[in-house]
Amino acid sequence: MNDLQKNDPRMYEAIQQEVDRQNEGLELIASENFVSRAVLQALGSPLTNKYAEGLPGKRYYGGCQHVDTAEDLARERAKELFGCEWVNVQPHSGASANAAVFLTLMKPGDTFLGLDLSHGGHLTHGSPVNFSGILYESAHYGVERDGPLAGRIDMNKVRDLARKQKPRMISIGASAYSRDFDYAAFRDIADEVGAFLWMDMAHTAGLIAAGLLNDPMPHCHIVSTTTHKTLRGPRGGMLLIGKDYENPFGKKAPASGRVKRMSELFDSAVFPGTQGGPLMHVIAAKGVSFREALQPDFVEYGKQIIANAKAMAKAFLDRGYDLVSGGTDNHLVLIDLRSKGLTGNEAEAALQTADITVNKNMVPFDETSPFVTSGMRIGTPAMTTRGFGEAEFEWVVELMDRILSDMGNGDVRRHVKEEVRALCSRFPLYDFAVA
Ligand SMILES: *Cc1c(COP(=O)(O)O)cnc(C)c1O
């Protein structure tokens, strides 16, 4: 980064300090990860200069032959990775991919059914401050408060709600749900009420690609994702269809008069529907990360993510913490801090003083506000990338517990911060310091 350092020292400094922060702290935010240097190199390439509206072979600009190759590589690799017939790798983010889903399947005012935000759902699944809640009517299913399904979704209740609400679309997917989904049961319900089924696998795409969680592809009409969470690619989004099908709206292709495929409607919803020019440097970087995810060691990585999350869950339970649903099947745990007399806000701030980064999170049936919260979400993908195994995660829980069980103690925080620094130095991340 010599040029950056020379020409723009203030910006260089900010970037260098963020790299240091990533190197020296425990990154436990469940939606974050660390990309490879190869992905960073593609991201930093001159492909950012190119306009390429349209799709490979059908662009609105000249000079697209090489970015066509890049996008085709990304598309072919994504299809192989997820065993699907069609992908669109252009969405700028998960939220952009979801905007294209709504534009294709819903008309303003239509009703959809999704997972409640405070039960682990995402902003783009009907929050009143998001377009999905502003333009569309949303009804929500949640997790059980107690009983054998405590913290989990009861499919019988989803069915009852679907029968009552008659939604045009049912969404699956979450940002803070530590259990897997029963896609076949969701599809059965969707078929019964005549709804489209959409899975947003933003958090779990990497684990699904590795074959470690249930596969949504055979059951859903559309799957959306981010590429930067467990999938470990650059920040971005993507849409996928397991098996393409004729669109039920009867829209015709202008030249041939044939009824369009569903994939064509989603392509148009991305561009020109909701986006302008695609980010070709990001698409190239997505392609690089998909190739990495196709290697056998990515499956080992996924297995370690889950093993680490289970070890972390057990270590918290052993220390008397409450976990929503009592444990985890994926990459995260959601801790209900109410029994410890702490809010998510307090816990997050206290841990940050020792360079341990987590995020406060609503828990099901939370009575606080989203700025306070009663919970804390902790994920393993990023530190697993750095090489942490179960023993390191058990140690991390011990360090967190020292702070959380002695909240006012500055000596404890200073001591834990030193331990964090020592632990991180054993698992190096990036080295961008300019010689
Ligand atoms: C992270 C996430 C998104 C949004 O992704 P952005 O890239 O931040 O827009 C959408 N849906 C779910 C379920 C997510 O977890």
Image (spheres, rainbow, N blue to C red):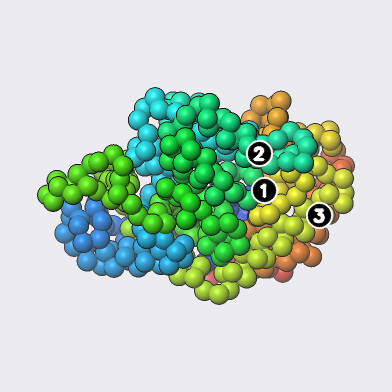
**Residue picked out by circle 2:** 154
What kind of residue is marked 3? Lys
Which residue does the image show at 39% across and 42% down from the upper left? 101
Q: Foreground mark, 1 or 2?
A: 2
Residue 156 in which image quadrant: top right
Label 1: how many residues lie within 10 Å, few (<14), some (14-19) or many (20+)?
A: many
Quadrant of the image occupied by residue 115: top right
Q: Rounded to the nearest whole Å, what is the CA distance between mark 2 and mark 3?
A: 24 Å
Q: Which badge, 1 or 2, comes first in the chain's sequence?
A: 2
Instruction: Report the residue marked by disc 1.
Output: 178
Q: What residue occupies the far front of the structure in this picture?
A: 192
Q: What residue is drawn where x is 71% and y is 29%?
A: 366
Mark 2: amino acid: Asp
Percent x, y of residue 136: 42, 27
Q: Which residue is mark 3?
A: 314
In the image: residue 30, left or right of residue 245: right
Q: Position of residue 410 (x, y in %)?
A: 84, 44
Closer-to-camera residue (239/248): 248
Quadrant in which the N terminus is drawn: bottom left
The type of residue carrying mark 1 is: Ser
Callout 3 secondary element = helix
